[in-house]
Image (spheres, grey):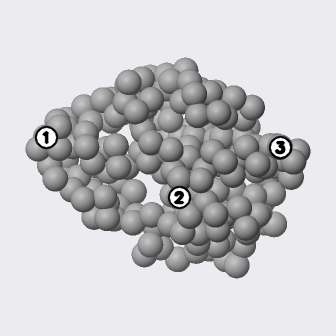
Amino acid sequence: MKIYVDFDDCLCETARGFCVLAEKLFQKLVPYEDIVFFNLQQSFSLTDAQYEEFMIEGHRPESLLSYEETPGAVDTVNGWLDIGHDVSIITGRPFSAYEASRQWLDTHGLSRVSLFCLNKYGRDSFIKNSDFNLELEDFYRMHFDVAVEDSPLAFPFFRHLPDLKVMVIDRPWNRSCDLPNGNYQRCYDWETIQRSV
């Protein structure tokens, strides 16, 4: 079985890290449960200049390496690998974040997974002139049986896979969205994901 796993807020608690960063940089106290928009500029009420600074700081290697593992994620992914499943981490992070992202995976015992930086959301990146090592046309040639994702904005990327089972990890920013069809299942933790897969 081929399995797609998103990185941020699936494998690690990126949004919780951004809550700390918003307070540190701008004295903005936004509780995690109040991050109801996937657009962090909107969730944290940031100006354009603040948002750019925020995203650059949040993607520095020391920030990327500091994000905590989502409980159960590493054990579940390693369990899949142990029984022969092919797991790919597909992230919307720019390729400039690849080395730190790879290091996070290796440090957390996920050295066996492939990592791809997919240009999920277009080239209007906060880090100017960003590169990605996977473009959408490349992704559309890939096949997956299962996906683990948190972002409603990523759901359209799965339309070319009508039989794909999508495990939607429950997050404040996806609770009000309608799931596209019966192949999508809301999961409240990695234990549920493991049982469902």
Of pointers 3 and 1, the one earlier in the residue sequence: 1
Q: In this view, does 170 lie above or below 134?
A: below
User: Element type at marker 2?
Assistant: loop
How far is disc 2 from disc 1 in space, using C-alphas? 26 Å
Label 3 CA crowd tier, 10 Å (few <14, some 14–19, many 20+): few
Secondary structure at badge 3 equals helix
Q: Name the residue under label 1.
A: 26
* Quarter of the rendering containing residue 27: top left
Relative to 119, say whether 73 is above or below: below
Q: How crowded is mark 2: few (under 14 residues within 10 Å), some or many (20 or more)?
A: many
> Residue 129 has which mark?
none
Could one spot residue 114 in this view of the protein?
no
Image quadrant in which you'd find residue 107: top right
Residue at x 69% of width, y 52% of height:
76
- In the rendered image, residue 91, in percent from the top left (x then y), is placed at 57, 40
- Which amino acid is tagged 2? Asp
In the rendered structure, which amino acid carries the disc numbered 1? Answer: Phe
In the image, 73 versus 163, the foreground residue is 73
- Residue occupying image coordinates x 73% and y 67%: 195
Inter-mark Cα distance, 3 to 1: 44 Å
Which residue is tagged 3?
82
The answer to whether one can see residue 150 in this image is: yes
Measuring from the top left, give residue 131's x and y in whole percent: 54, 24
Q: For mark 2, what is the residue?
A: 150
Q: Which of marks 3 and 1 is in front?
A: 3
